[in-house]
Amino acid sequence: MLFIKPENNQSIWIPKHNKVFTDKLKLVLEHTLTHKTTEFDDLTDHDVNSGYFLFYGLDFRNLDSGEYEYKLFDGYGWQKENGMLQVMTKLSEPISYKHNNQTIIYKHN
Protein backbone atom coordinates (compact mmCIF):
# COMPACT_ATOMS: atom_id res chain seq x y z
CA MET A 1 0.00 0.00 0.00
CA LEU A 2 1.22 3.49 -0.85
CA PHE A 3 0.78 6.37 1.60
CA ILE A 4 0.58 10.04 0.59
CA LYS A 5 -0.31 13.36 2.16
CA PRO A 6 -2.35 15.63 -0.12
CA GLU A 7 0.12 18.32 -1.17
CA ASN A 8 0.99 20.21 -4.32
CA ASN A 9 4.10 19.39 -6.38
CA GLN A 10 4.51 15.93 -4.89
CA SER A 11 6.31 12.89 -6.25
CA ILE A 12 5.06 9.32 -6.01
CA TRP A 13 6.90 6.00 -6.33
CA ILE A 14 4.84 3.07 -7.64
CA PRO A 15 6.36 -0.45 -7.58
CA LYS A 16 7.10 -1.74 -11.08
CA HIS A 17 6.31 -5.40 -11.72
CA ASN A 18 7.01 -5.43 -15.46
CA LYS A 19 8.79 -3.32 -18.02
CA VAL A 20 6.81 -0.62 -19.75
CA PHE A 21 8.18 0.96 -22.91
CA THR A 22 6.02 4.00 -23.44
CA ASP A 23 6.54 7.73 -23.25
CA LYS A 24 3.31 8.62 -21.47
CA LEU A 25 1.42 6.92 -18.68
CA LYS A 26 -1.92 7.58 -16.97
CA LEU A 27 -2.60 7.18 -13.25
CA VAL A 28 -6.23 6.65 -12.18
CA LEU A 29 -7.23 6.85 -8.52
CA GLU A 30 -10.65 5.65 -7.34
CA HIS A 31 -11.81 6.32 -3.78
CA THR A 32 -13.03 2.98 -2.44
CA LEU A 33 -15.88 4.51 -0.42
CA THR A 34 -17.21 7.28 -2.68
CA HIS A 35 -16.00 5.84 -6.02
CA LYS A 36 -14.85 9.34 -7.01
CA THR A 37 -12.18 9.04 -9.72
CA THR A 38 -9.15 11.28 -10.22
CA GLU A 39 -6.89 10.96 -13.28
CA PHE A 40 -3.36 12.16 -13.99
CA ASP A 41 -2.61 12.05 -17.74
CA ASP A 42 0.61 12.28 -19.77
CA LEU A 43 2.90 11.20 -16.93
CA THR A 44 6.57 10.47 -17.60
CA ASP A 45 8.49 7.83 -15.66
CA HIS A 46 11.58 9.63 -14.35
CA ASP A 47 13.39 6.49 -13.20
CA VAL A 48 13.09 3.92 -15.98
CA ASN A 49 16.00 1.80 -14.73
CA SER A 50 14.72 1.07 -11.22
CA GLY A 51 11.99 -1.13 -9.82
CA TYR A 52 9.64 1.86 -9.47
CA PHE A 53 7.69 4.27 -11.59
CA LEU A 54 8.64 7.74 -10.40
CA PHE A 55 6.39 10.70 -11.15
CA TYR A 56 7.16 14.29 -10.14
CA GLY A 57 4.97 17.35 -9.69
CA LEU A 58 1.59 15.77 -8.96
CA ASP A 59 -1.08 17.81 -7.16
CA PHE A 60 -2.89 15.67 -4.60
CA ARG A 61 -4.52 18.57 -2.73
CA ASN A 62 -8.03 17.80 -4.06
CA LEU A 63 -8.01 14.18 -2.90
CA ASP A 64 -10.29 13.23 -0.02
CA SER A 65 -8.87 11.39 2.94
CA GLY A 66 -9.24 7.64 2.76
CA GLU A 67 -8.34 4.59 0.74
CA TYR A 68 -7.98 4.53 -3.05
CA GLU A 69 -7.38 1.87 -5.65
CA TYR A 70 -4.76 3.05 -8.12
CA LYS A 71 -4.37 1.82 -11.69
CA LEU A 72 -1.53 2.73 -14.02
CA PHE A 73 -2.09 2.54 -17.78
CA ASP A 74 0.43 2.77 -20.61
CA GLY A 75 -0.02 5.00 -23.66
CA TYR A 76 -2.03 2.29 -25.42
CA GLY A 77 -4.57 1.93 -22.61
CA TRP A 78 -3.19 -1.35 -21.23
CA GLN A 79 -3.26 -1.59 -17.45
CA LYS A 80 0.30 -2.11 -16.16
CA GLU A 81 -0.02 -1.78 -12.38
CA ASN A 82 -2.67 -1.59 -9.70
CA GLY A 83 -2.75 -1.46 -5.92
CA MET A 84 -3.98 0.42 -2.89
CA LEU A 85 -3.15 3.97 -1.86
CA GLN A 86 -3.96 5.71 1.43
CA VAL A 87 -4.45 9.48 1.57
CA MET A 88 -3.79 10.88 5.02
CA THR A 89 -5.06 14.36 5.83
CA LYS A 90 -4.68 16.35 9.02
CA LEU A 91 -7.78 16.62 11.13
CA SER A 92 -8.93 20.22 11.46
CA GLU A 93 -9.87 19.70 15.10
CA PRO A 94 -8.73 16.93 17.40
CA ILE A 95 -11.35 14.41 18.29
CA SER A 96 -12.04 14.32 22.00
CA TYR A 97 -14.63 12.57 24.06
CA LYS A 98 -16.18 13.74 27.31
CA HIS A 99 -16.35 11.00 29.89
CA ASN A 100 -19.64 10.95 31.73
CA ASN A 101 -19.44 8.41 34.50
CA GLN A 102 -22.91 8.28 35.96
CA THR A 103 -23.95 5.43 38.19
CA ILE A 104 -27.62 4.58 38.46
CA ILE A 105 -28.82 2.21 41.19
CA TYR A 106 -32.29 0.76 40.98
CA LYS A 107 -33.99 -0.61 44.10
CA HIS A 108 -36.33 -3.51 43.89
CA ASN A 109 -39.21 -3.38 46.43
Image (tube, grey):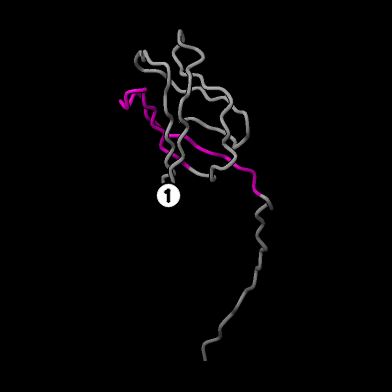
Question: Is disc 1 surrounded by few (<14), some (14 to 19) or many (20+) residues within 10 Å?
Answer: few
Amino acid type, callout 1: Leu
Q: In which quarter of the image is residue 27?
A: top left
Residue 96 in the image: above or below residue 13: below
Residue 50 in the image: above or below residue 78: above
Residue drawn 47% across the image and 24% down it: 43
Residue with the mark numbered 1: 33
Residue drawn 46% across the image and 23% down it: 14
Q: Position of residue 50 (x, y in %)?
A: 46, 10
Q: Quadrant of residue 6?
A: top right
Q: Quadrant of residue 26?
A: top left
**Range drawn in magenta:** 67-91
Residue drawn 64% across the image and 72% down it: 102
Q: Does the magenta stretch include residue 8?
A: no
Q: Does the magenta stretch include residue 83?
A: yes
Q: Is the magenta stretch mostly helix, strand or loop?
A: strand
Residue drawn 62% across the image and 74% down it: 103
Q: Is 42 left or right of 60, judged from the image as shown?
A: left
In depth, the one of 24 and 109 nearer the eye is: 24
Q: In which quarter of the image is the N terminus?
A: top left
Q: How many labels does the image show?
A: 1
Q: Where is residue 30 in the image (x, y as percent from the top left)?
A: 42, 41
Q: Position of residue 11 (x, y in %)?
A: 57, 24
Residue lying farthest to the top in this orientation? 49
**Which type of secondary structure does the marked residue at label 1 adopt?**
loop
Q: Position of residue 15 (x, y in %)?
A: 43, 20
Residue 91 in the image: above or below residue 71: below
Q: Is 3 left or right of 80, judged from the image as shown?
A: right
In depth, the one of 44 and 13 nearer the eye is: 44
